[in-house]
Image: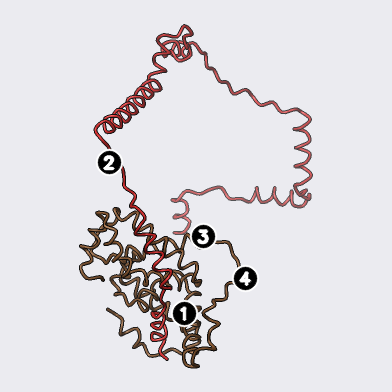
Chain colours: A brown, B red
Amino acid sequence: MLDGENKIVMNAIRGEASAFGLLYDHYQPKIYRFILIKVGRREEAEDLTHQVFLSAWQNIEDYEDLGYPFGSWLYQMARNQVIDHYRTRRPTLNIEEVDPDNLTYDSQSAAQAEERLEMEKVKRAILKLKPAHQDVIIMRFVEEMSVKEVAAALHKTEGAVKLLRHRALIQLRKSLGIQNESHSDELDSTN
Amino acid sequence: MNLIQLIRKLKSIEPDPAYTRRSRSLIVETPMTVRPIMNLWQVVVRGLQFGSAIALTGVLLILVLGGFSVWKALSPFQLTSLDPASLKAEAEAVDAQIQITEIVYPETLLKSVSELAAGLLPQKTTEEKAAGKAAAVDTPQPMTIDEVLGKLAE
């Protein structure tokens, strides 16, 4: 959460573009990551992220402070944008889908390339999950939001979020071919 | 490597700085959509619109619900079938007599049924008929309880 966020949000609601700029700077990378992992393509993630913030700026008067970070409201908008995107998108598959970033391994060290490949593998595995599982995994483990914040953003109870997280991890392990690890990874995040 | 550690590596994903700059300036420079504040005249007009809509709905309801009564009172074509007095008189005048007439079967039908029944029942032999007669003769007459007790005491 941004320092003095409530005041910044109030200023943005009053129409101060600079205040909204601060919110943009803080939340834009998070929302971009969230969308990119869910849609899998950089160009689409950029367009959707832009739409989310534009919509947030134009409808900021509708924002109600319910005691959660402003980010929860943005995540809700991002989720809706992604749902709309999948609803209206035409299925296409062409050569341009190859991410140019993935073709630059020659200039990188072997370790870096291996790490990128691993990340790509995890991204693909997350992409195969159900949308609700994706949301929980990204918010909880990539963005390291608390269970309470995730519950607020997803309009679910904390218990439901924990259950989703548990099921999502099982699916991910299965998808990545990882043997059942000790549950320390889940225990460290029970708050 | 631990699965959670693998997932956390995705945090290194960052948007392109050039895209971020462009998008930010586009959004911040976009004027906020200001919702129009209604002046007094607009408030009055809106109120009149709402009031007239309610009044028209009321008039329509009265016309629909009261239309039938008005028609009954004013129409030159009186609906006599819906006058309760005339309906009662008409009902009293009806002579409702319901008779169950005797069912008459055709003679030929009765004859054929009796013939069919005779054909289906097994014919008794003359010996059976004779045995039946003998059994009827041997059948003792019913005795009173006093007679039975007297016989037992002997």
Q: Earlier in the sequence, mark 4 or mark 3?
A: 3
Q: Earlier in the sequence, mark 1 or mark 4?
A: 4
Pinpoint the chain carrying mark 2: B
Q: Quadrant of the C terminus of chain A?
A: bottom left
Q: Is residue A111 above or below residue A129?
A: below
Rendering coords of residue B64 (x, y %): 41, 22
Label 1, label 2: how far apart the Cα atoms are: 52 Å
Question: Mark 1 — residue?
Answer: A171
Of badges 1 and 4, nearer the viewer stands: 4
Of badges 1 and 3, nearer the viewer stands: 3
Name the secondary structure under disc 4. loop
Instruction: State whether discs 1 and 3 lie on one chain.
Output: yes
Q: Is residue B126 above or below residue A184?
A: above
Question: Mark 4 — residue?
Answer: A94
Rendering coords of residue A116 (x, y %): 48, 85
Label 1, label 3: how far apart the Cα atoms are: 24 Å
Pinpoint the chain carrying mark 4: A
The dot on residue B37 is: 2
Q: Quadrant of residue A148?
A: bottom left
